Amino acid sequence: MGDDSSDETPLSPGDAFAALGHEIRVGILEALADATRVERPLAFSELRGRVGTVDSAKFNYHLGELVGHFVARTDDGYDLRPAGERVAEAVLSGAVTDDPVMDRVPIDATCPYCGAGVEMAYRDERTAAFCPECRGAYAMSAGRVEKDAPDEYGFLGYLDLPPAGIQNRTPTEVFETALRWHLSGQLLASTGTCSRCSAPMEEWLTLCDDHEGGDGACPECDNRYAAQHSARCTNCVYSRRTTFGVYLLDSVELQSFLTAHGVDLVSPDYDQFASVVMNYGEEIHDADPFEASFTFTADGDAITLTVDDDFDVVDVAEQTVD
């Protein structure tokens, strides 16, 4: 006899949250998550022992409330179902229990636009990076995104990172980890897939009609680049807006160009990555229908990707830069 949870009626969102509304139930999920896959499934007595000294009848009641949606019951004991794994991951990542704050501090990274040292802060499960010397990528008032950053600082952007990501890491290591974590989600989102729930993403363009970027951010839109790509999940709350330098990372041509010039997209060095992907050339050919070219440069070589109104790459050109 195998998993008997397949006959259970799916829970409504309200019932699902209600099923988690007790510390013993959360403790059961944590205990199962702490057990290795070799150890699982856990027998009733073993699972109860790992959770702690709980009255057997009470423990059985709370375990029963989880079986079917979050926990699977088999002949050999109890194991996590996918929904239970997701809840356990959220708890263990600190996303629902911790709210750490790291005050602004210099890190071992340089601004891709002016070469100044970058400063970083962490709060609300994301890093915020600033340039003390130029207006960065987004010349919004730094006071709007980080309370302790001087107004004259330029903003270089946010990088998502769960609270567990800052454990036992220096500020520079936190920033490097955030870049890897954030980039994995951005790459998936660029393919039209939500990195949180896997549902399709809907996408749209934000374009500054009177853009005056030059060597800094536009006074009209507060962005260095006129074109910004936005997307939101059709199912959950995930949304994001990014430059086309990041959006186009799912392009095989750009990936090949970056790899040929030593840019690692799995574990990137921030300075090397940002100098190519964040500091690029932009030429808007037409607003409606949208058509634009984006030029990326590395070690004297350049690649230009032309994008149409569907955000598809319709032309690729490589050249040597003097």
Image (cartoon, rainbow, N blue to C red):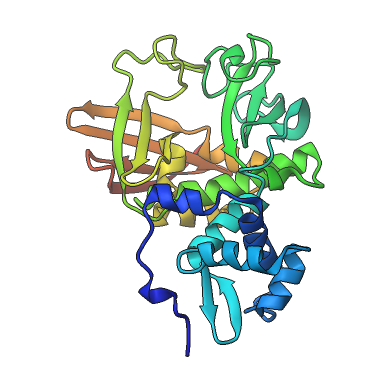
Lateral position of residue 301 relative to residue 97, left or right: left
Q: Residue at x 32, y 27 (%)?
A: 206
| Number of callouts | 0
Q: Is residue 163 visible?
A: yes
Which of 147 and 110 lies nearest the eye of the viewer? 147
Which of 59 and 110 lies nearest the eye of the viewer? 59
Lateral position of residue 293 relative to residue 23, left or right: left
Spot occupied by residue 166 in the image (x, y as percentages of width and height): 74, 43
Q: Residue at x 58, y 37 (%)?
A: 159
Q: Residue at x 68, y 26 (%)?
A: 115
Residue extending furthest left? 289
Which of 1 and 163 lies nearest the eye of the viewer? 1
Which of 309 and 258 lies nearest the eye of the viewer? 309
Spot occupied by residue 316 in the image (x, y as percentages of width and height): 33, 48
On screen, residue 180 above or below 307: below
Spot occupied by residue 243 in the image (x, y as percentages of width and height): 44, 34
On screen, residue 166 above or below 120: below
Q: Residue at x 64, y 63 (%)?
A: 58
Lateral position of residue 3 relative to residue 174, left or right: left
Spot occupied by residue 77 in the image (x, y as percentages of width and height): 60, 81
Residue extending furthest bottom? 1
Q: Is residue 35 visible?
A: no
On screen, residue 269 above or below 207: below
Q: Quadrant of residue 210?
A: top left
Lateral position of residue 265 relative to residue 104, left or right: left
